[in-house]
Image: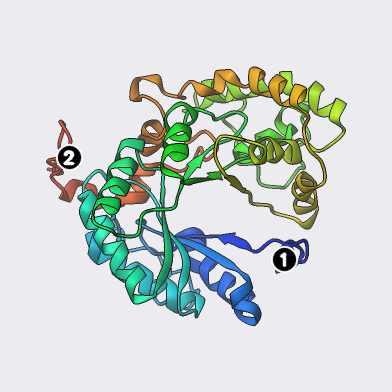
C-alpha cells in the first residue's frame, strides 16, 4: 500500500492487474486501495487464465486446473471471470479489460461480440488485446469497424530495450489502426536496471533471472546472454546520463514517436519506485535515443527464431523476462489434453 500511495501521490492513476496475479489476491488488494477514490483510477485487469482464489476472499485457494471453463478466451470464461473480478475489487465497472493471452481456439467474432456485450452492459468501458498475433488484432478490429462495434483500443505486448521483436509488425499496425501500446515487462525482469551486469544482487532477495544468467543448462540461458551483452554496451551510456537504468529504459519507451506507448512497471520497494519515477524528470536527446536504438537492434530478432516473431515464442514458451512461467500451462492447466484443437496442424493429443 505504501508503494501504491506514493505512486498515486506522484500523479499515477493507471493500475494494471489480472484475475490471476497473486492467485487473484492482486485484484482484491487493488480494490481496497482505490475504494476511497474510485473515479480517479483507471483500472486494467485481464481474463483468459484461471482464477486462483476460488472463494474470492483472498485465501488464495489453488486454481482448479482441471476445469476447462475456468480458462480460455471463450464467452463462458469471459463472463465468469469479469463477474468474479468485479466482486473481488468491489467495483461496478472495469475501465480496461484485456484478453490476457491468445488461446488459438476461440473464434475471433465470439471474442469481439462477447466483449461488446459487456461494454453495452456497462461492466467494462474499453477492451484491449494482450499477446495476440497482429493479424488477429487487425481482423478483430476490422470486424468491429464493419459492424459498428466497439474496437479494441490497445495491445499489451512485451517491449523493452532487450525485447523489441514486436516492433516490425505491431508498431505499424497500431499506427494504422490508431491503437496504443502498453508495454509489459519494460524492465525485462530487472535486467534493464543493469544489476545483473554489475553484480549488484542483494543477498536474500528474489532475483527472477537467476539461474538463467549463469547456468548453461537453463532454457533461457542463450537469450539471457544476448540480453546481458546488449546491456553491457548500454551501461556506459547510462552512466554518462547520470540516471538509473530503470528510468532510462522506461524513458526510451515513453519517447517512442510512432505510437502512444505506456510502459507498465512493477517494483518491490519504495526505493525502486522512486528510481522508476525518475523517468518523468528528464528527456533523452535525439543523439542518445539513436545510440540506444542502434545498440539494442539485436533484440528485434525473436528469442526463438523457429517460432517466428512476437508473440509466437512467448505463446509457446513464455519469455526470458519471466523465465519460470510456461505459457501453455498458465493457459490450459491440466485441460490441454482434453482439447482436440482443429485450428492447429498438430492437434493436442489425449493422455493415454
- Write the residue at 69% across / 21% down: 290
Q: Which residue does the numbered mark 1 point to in the structure image?
A: 8
Q: Nearer the viewer, residue 152 or 194?
A: 152
- Write the residue at 34% across / 20% down: 306
Q: Secondary structure at mark 1?
A: helix
Q: Secondary structure at mark 2?
A: loop
Q: Is residue 237 above or below residue 103?
A: above
Q: Is residue 67 visible?
A: no
- Write the residue at 50% across / 80% down: 90
Quadrant for the N terminus, please.
Answer: bottom right
Residue 189 appears left or right of 270: left
Among the two numbered marks 2 and 1 on one chain, the one whose residue lies closer to the N terminus: 1
Residue 297 image point, x, y percent: 58, 19
Residue 70 appears left or right of 213: left
Residue 52 appears left or right of 190: left
Please rate how many residues cluster around mark 1, counting C-alpha atoms within 10 Å: few if below 14, some from 14 to 19, many from 20.
some
Quadrant for the C terminus, please.
Answer: top left
Corner quadrant of residue 310: top left
Q: Is residue 179 above or below residue 210?
A: below
Residue 36 image point, x, y percent: 65, 81
Q: Which residue does the numbered mark 2 point to in the structure image?
A: 348
Q: Is residue 156 above or below residue 38?
A: above
Residue 273 image point, x, y percent: 75, 53
Q: Is residue 220 above or below residue 133?
A: above
Amino acid at each position: 500500500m505504501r508503494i501504491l500511495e506514493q505512486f498515486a501521490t506522484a500523479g499515477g492513476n493507471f493500475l494494471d492487474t489480472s484475475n490471476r496475479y497473486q492467485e487473484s489476491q492482486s485484484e482484491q488488494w487493488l480494490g481496497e486501495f482505490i475504494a476511497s477514490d474510485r473515479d480517479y483510477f483507471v483500472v486494467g485487469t485481464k481474463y483468459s487464465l484461471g482464477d486462483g482464489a476460488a472463494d474470492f476472499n483472498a485465501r488464495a485457494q489453488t486454481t482448479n486446473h482441471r476445469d476447462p471453463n475456468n480458462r480460455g478466451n471463450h464467452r463462458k470464461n469471459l463472463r465468469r471471470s469479469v463477474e468474479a473480478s468485479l466482486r473481488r475489487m468491489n467495483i461496478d465497472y472495469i475501465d480496461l479489460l484485456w484478453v490476457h493471452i491468445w488461446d488459438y481456439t476461440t473464434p475471433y467474432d465470439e471474442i469481439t461480440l462477447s466483449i461488446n456485450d459487456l461494454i453495452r452492459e456497462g461492466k467494462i468501458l474499453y477492451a484491449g488485446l494482450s499477446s495476440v498475433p497482429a493479424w488477429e488484432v487487425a481482423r478483430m478490429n476490422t470486424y468491429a469497424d464493419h459492424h459498428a462495434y466497439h474496437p479494441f483500443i490497445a495491445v499489451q505486448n512485451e517491449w523493452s530495450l532487450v525485447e523489441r521483436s514486436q516492433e516490425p509488425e505491431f508498431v505499424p499496425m497500431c499506427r494504422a489502426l490508431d491503437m496504443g501500446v502498453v508495454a509489459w515487462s519494460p524492465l525485462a525482469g530487472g535486467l534493464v536496471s543493469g544489476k545483473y551486469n554489475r553484480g549488484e544482487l542483494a543477498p536474500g532477495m528474489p532475483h527472477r533471472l537467476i539461474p538463467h544468467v549463469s547456468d548453461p543448462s537453463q532454457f533461457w540461458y542463450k537469450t539471457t546472454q544476448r540480453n546481458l551483452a546488449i546491456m553491457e554496451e548500454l551501461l556506459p551510456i547510462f552512466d554518462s546520463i547520470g540516471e538509473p537504468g530503470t528510468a532510462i529504459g522506461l524513458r526510451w519507451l515513453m519517447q517512442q514517436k510512432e505510437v502512444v506507448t505506456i510502459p507498465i512497471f512493477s517494483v518491490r520497494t519504495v526505493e525502486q519506485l522512486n528510481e522508476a519515477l525518475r523517468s518523468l524528470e528528464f528527456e533523452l536527446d535525439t543523439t542518445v535515443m539513436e545510440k540506444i536504438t542502434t545498440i539494442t537492434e539485436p533484440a528485434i530478432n525473436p528469442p526463438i527464431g523457429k517460432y517466428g516473431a512476437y508473440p509466437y515464442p512467448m505463446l509457446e514458451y513464455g519469455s526470458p523476462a519471466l523465465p519460470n512461467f510456461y505459457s501453455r500451462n498458465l493457459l490450459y492447466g491440466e485441460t490441454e489434453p482434453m482439447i482436440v484443437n482443429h485450428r492447429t496442424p498438430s492437434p493436442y493429443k489425449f493422455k493415454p
